[in-house]
Image (tube, rainbow, N blue to C red):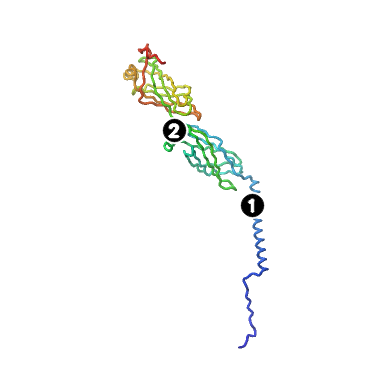
Amino acid sequence: MASDENPRLVEIVSREKGPEKEEKEEKDGKEDEGFLEKVKDFISDVGEKIENAIGFGKPTADVSGIHVPHISHHKAEFVVDVLVKNPNPVPIPLIDINYSIESDERKLVSGLIPDAGTIHGHSSETVKIPVSLIYDDIRETYHEIRTGSVIPYTIKVDLIIDVPVFGRITIPLQKSGEIPIPHKPDIDLEKIKFQKFSWEQTVATLHLKIENKNDFDLGLKDLDYEVWLGEVNIGGADLEKSGNLPKNEISHINLPITFRPKEFGSALWDMIRGRGTGYSMKGNINVDTPFGEMKLPISKEGGTTCLKKHKRDGGSDDDDDDD
């Protein structure tokens, strides 16, 4: 067979890297990585310098006070003052406020306030968080909590804030104290003593027994009341009267009342001429307590009281005893 006088040269290109080329690529890769690290460091450094120059920082907060603007036999209304300091030059939004009130690890109430407002740049502002405690709800849930007692509480607040540079952060706060579960006073109209007894005008004194069943004193400021003898409302009064009702004790108060028997017909006259009658009494007392002012109801229905007259109005010697 004749051979080809002009043979073709076939070059086989290997995909394997020679040692010199591999060393060169490795060197180039390290240079690329070094460049990227330098870029990252540069960006981080610039970011820190911008942050420091502009003055971005994390806000701070503290519970500056707890007020109880209203407390009654049914509920207590709290206002939690939270002082928030914004060191940043731009406003920061309060996204949410989560709050709860606990007593000995028992959750009494909790809630969420969305879109709670904005804290202006470079300022301190007080955020007011209203919270209500409904006593019936607490007693239904926790039967061991006794009416008239004073219980410890802890208010917990989580402020969720959106801060430039830092993003969304949560600031947890809490503050502890004591709150009462008020018991309305028990009353009993022991007797009605008449000073002036006539068809036209009768002046009498109501001898009232009040039992304070609370674990704290009640400083009596004033009271209003109405009295029924049988089915007849003989009136009442608003009386400014100061005094102290010691905790878990019985006190006695004398209340004046004036009415005209002829306006109520013979039924009332017959009761007054007798020695006793059924009665009902309703009203309110305004008191000072260690927890603020309270308006507490007083009421008695279906009671029986003694009617006493001075001797000059036909009463006996016994009627003038125990003034």
Secondary structure beneath label 1: helix
Q: x, y percentage for residue 154?
A: 51, 37
Q: Residue at x 65, y 59 (%)?
A: 33
Q: CA distance from mark 2 to mark 1?
A: 60 Å
Secondary structure beneath label 2: loop
Contact check, label 2 and label 1, Cβ < 8 Å: no
Question: Mark 1 sits on what residue?
Answer: 44
Q: Residue at x 51, y 29 (%)?
A: 290
Camera-side mark, 2 or 1: 2
> What amino acid type is highlighted by mark number 1?
Ser
The correct choice, above or below, for 18 with respect to 191 in the image is below
Q: Decide if residue 160 is on the left or right side of residue 236.
A: right
Q: Decide if residue 295 is on the left or right side of residue 44.
A: left
Q: Quadrant of the C terminus?
A: top left
Q: x, y percentage for residue 281?
A: 39, 24
Which sits in the foreground, 154 or 72? 154
> What amino acid type is highlighted by mark number 2?
Arg
Find the residue positioned furthest to the top. Answer: 312
Q: Quadrant of residue 119?
A: top right
Question: Mark 2 sits on what residue?
Answer: 146
The correct choice, above or below, for 106 with respect to 287 in the image is below
Q: Earlier in the sequence, mark 2 or mark 1?
A: 1
- Mark 2 burial class by Cα count in 10 Å: few <14, some 14-19, many 20+: some
